[in-house]
Amino acid sequence: AIVAARQSIPDRFRSARLANLRQRLPAVPWTDERLRSLLSVPTVTLVGASAAGKTTLACALFRAHLDHAMAADDDAFDAVARSRFFAARDLPDLKPDDWDRACGAPLVVLYDVGAESGDKGTYRDSDRARVAADCLARRHDRNVRTIVTTYGRDADWKSWYGDGIARR
C-alpha cells in the first residue's frame, strides 16, 4: 500500500527528500528546523511561480510523512499508506474510490491548485474549480493534512473559489 502512495508522486519528483532538498533547491531560504516544522502543520500552501520549487518541496514533505510511517505503528502506517499526490486538474475525472481518497486520506498533495480550470481569471463558475473547492472544503472539514501547490495569492483564491476556501 505504501508503494502506491510513493508511485502517485510524479517520476521527476519521486527522489525528492528533505535530506536532499538543498541539492535540488539550493536557494531554499528555510532552515532544516523550519522545514521539519511543516510536517506538523495541517495545511501547507506553497505559493510561487512555475519552477520555484513548490512541487519538489511538497513531494519531499510527502515522502517524509511516508518514511515516518514506515517506522511507526500499524495504524499510522495504514493511514499514511492511503495518502496520495493528485493534480488538481485531475480531480473531476477521478474514480469514486480515488475521489474519496482525495477528500479524506490522512495526507494529500494537491498539485497546481488554481490551474484546473484552464485560463486564468474568474473560476467560480467553472465546474472543475467547483470540484477542487469541494475537495479542499471536505479536507478542511475532516481536519486532514493537505499540502497545496499553487501560483495563486490570496486575492486569486477569493476570485477562484470564494471567501470560504480562501480563508481556509
Image (tube, rainbow, N blue to C red):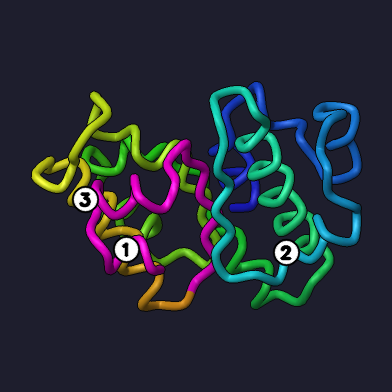
**In which image quadrant can residue 13 be found?**
top right
Of badges 3 and 1, nearer the viewer stands: 1
Label 2 environment density (alpha carbons within 10 Å; few <14, some 14–19, many ≥20):
some
What percent of the width, then of the height, locates residue 23? Answer: 90, 28
Residue 165 on the magenta segment: yes
Of residues 107 and 159, the one nearer the viewer is 159
Q: Where's the C terminus, which quadrant?
A: bottom left
Q: On residue 39, which mark appears? A: 2
Q: Residue at x 52, y 43 (%)?
A: 149
For the residues labelled 2 and 1, the Cα–Cα distance comes to 22 Å
Q: Nearer the viewer, residue 153 or 81?
A: 153
Q: Horizontal placement of 18 versus 82: left or right?
A: right
The boundaries of the magenta stretch are 144-168
Residue ID at (70%, 71%): 40
- Residue 165's disc is 1
Between the C-alphas of marks 3 and 1, the distance is 12 Å
Label 3: element kind: helix
- Does 41 appear above or below 17? below
The answer to whether marks 3 and 1 mark residues whose Cβ atoms lie closer than 8 Å is no
Residue 96 or residue 47, whichever sits in front = 47
Tag 2 and tag 3, C-beta contact below 8 Å: no
Q: Which residue is label 3 attached to?
A: 131
Q: x%, y% of residue 21?
A: 84, 37
Q: Amino acid at mark 1?
A: Ile
Disc 2 marks a residue whose amino acid type is Leu
- Residue 50 in which image quadrant: top right
